[in-house]
Image (tube, rainbow, N blue to C red):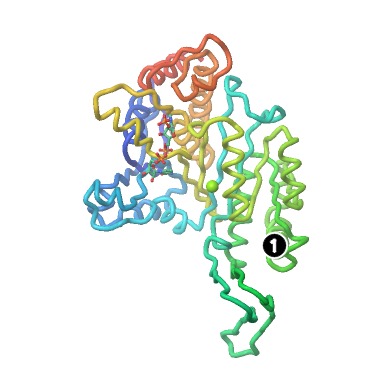
Amino acid sequence: MDKIRMNPIVEIDGDEMTRVIWKMIKEELLEPYVALNTEYYDLGIQKRDETDDQITVDAAEAIKKYHVGVKCATITPNAQRVEEFGLKKMWPSPNGTIRAALDGTVFRAAILTSRIKPYIRTWKKPITVARHAYADVYKATEYRVPGPGKAELLFTPADGGPEVRQTIYDYECPGVLQGTYNKDSSICSFARACCEYALSVGQDLWFSTKDTISKQYDQTFKLLFQKIYEEEYKEKFKKAGITYFYTLIDDAVARVVRSEGGFVWALKNYDGDVMSDMISTAFGSLAMMTSCLVSPDGNFEYEAAHGTVTRHYHRYLQGESTSTNPIATIFAWTGALNKRGELDGNAALCTFAKKLEAAALATIESGVMTKDLAEISEGDDVRCVDTAEFLRAIRAQYEAL
Ligand code: NAP
Ligand code: MG
């Protein structure tokens, strides 16, 4: 049988258990069927250290060139990791570096199976959370007010225009004070990335802020989002049969809980941080969560939302077989291959990606699954297997479809 041919994508290898699984997935599920064409970047912690993290920058540049990438989970070094690997320094998070280089927004969505019931009964389709991962409270300037005194907001224009000064509060006792900011350029990039993503998955886009209370700050988010949508995406949305919907965040939360899912929910930085954890937990399992980084000019990077699963890796190094769930990593690959196929009109590649996803889900539906899922699965016919056996079962399903 001829293998499916493809144009290149960027392959970004990573660390620990996910690095082991990465190789297994390629050998068992991809290479037998696809003439994999990838530009390979090793972002394993040793290679990042060896290259003074240049490899991460190069990988991000490659995604801009080929427009599609797939990434394995990587270690974000902390003090303990610096010691463990004898690193030259505490290199920054690769995901942070790549996100900054692509000016990207992260979209997180759960992979659903009938075996794992969401805690919210009405949810039937995934809810994708898009978090604006720039500034706001994460880059705030904070001050512990020691006692009575006046706090002011002062803006000094760079062009020498008059200063703008407003009283925030006249303190009569100790208190707290915080200054947060954001930029039009970043908000517009966020809006574009969200519109691009909604189009690419063919789902409605929701956006919510607290603009009734925050009449300048949140109102600006609302207006810029609306403007980008009206001027650049309205027609495309109409053609795709999807809608853009703005509502106050309180209303959005109530609607999300009552909904059946199947939309993209764009949120400001803090709201997205909190809501993405709530949504992913309510859908059941971190190991079933995919993550896609989208840049406003249409570059896509796919990965699992979970980390390198260090605890399992240490057992693997002891020679134990582990029951680590490869689903999110498989879906990172199928997401990237499907996107490559879409961009190039390569129907065979898209069909392969969809069929492999269906086979992976059918395997779980049949009762064969890894330990993390077995623990929360419905049904009394569950068979818990290790990663290698699970991948073989998926391959058998694929062959049978
Ligand atoms: P983690 O790797 O996501 O694992 C936390 C725990 O969640 C695991 O110990 C395991 O629980 C469970 N788990 C996660 N993924 C699983 C899977 N596929 N199958 C089965 N169980 C799974 O998070 P972490 O231990 O906090 O972080 C480990 C390393 O990953 C850190 O160095 C961190 O910097 C990095 N990290 C990278 C990314 C990324 O590259 N996107 C994201 C997050 C963390 P049990 O042990 O109870 O089975
Ligand atoms: Mg969080």
Q: Quadrant of residue 2?
A: top left
Nearer to the camera, 184 or 299: 184
In the rendered structure, the answer to whether residue 44 lies left or right of residue 247 reads left
| 178 lies above or below 196 | below
Mark 1 element type: helix
In the rendered structure, the answer to whether residue 323 lies left or right of residue 351 reads left
Q: Residues within 10 Å of mark 1 (few under 14, many from 20)?
A: some
The percent coordinates of residue 65 (x first, y second) are: 42, 52
The percent coordinates of residue 379 (x first, y second) are: 57, 13
Query: Across the whole image, how many numbered discs are drawn on residues?
Result: 1
Q: Residue at x 34, y 52 (%)?
A: 78
In the rendered structure, the answer to whether residue 390 lies left or right of residue 83 reads right
Q: Residue at x 72, y 29 (%)?
A: 122
Q: Farthest residue toward the top? A: 381
| 84 lies above or below 371 | below
Three-letter amino acid code of the residue under disc 1:
Asp
Q: Is mark 1 within 8 Å of ligand 2?
A: no
Q: Residue at x 50, y 36 (%)?
A: 335
The quadrant of the image that shows the N terminus is top left
The percent coordinates of residue 166 (x first, y second) are: 69, 81
Q: Residue at x 43, y 50 (%)?
A: 95
Nearer to the camera, 12 or 156: 156
Q: Quadrant of residue 115?
A: top right
Nearer to the camera, 235 or 250: 250
Q: Quadrant of residue 277?
A: top right
Look at mark 1 in the image and give the residue it sits on: 218
| 100 lies above or below 253 | below
| 352 lies above or below 393 | below
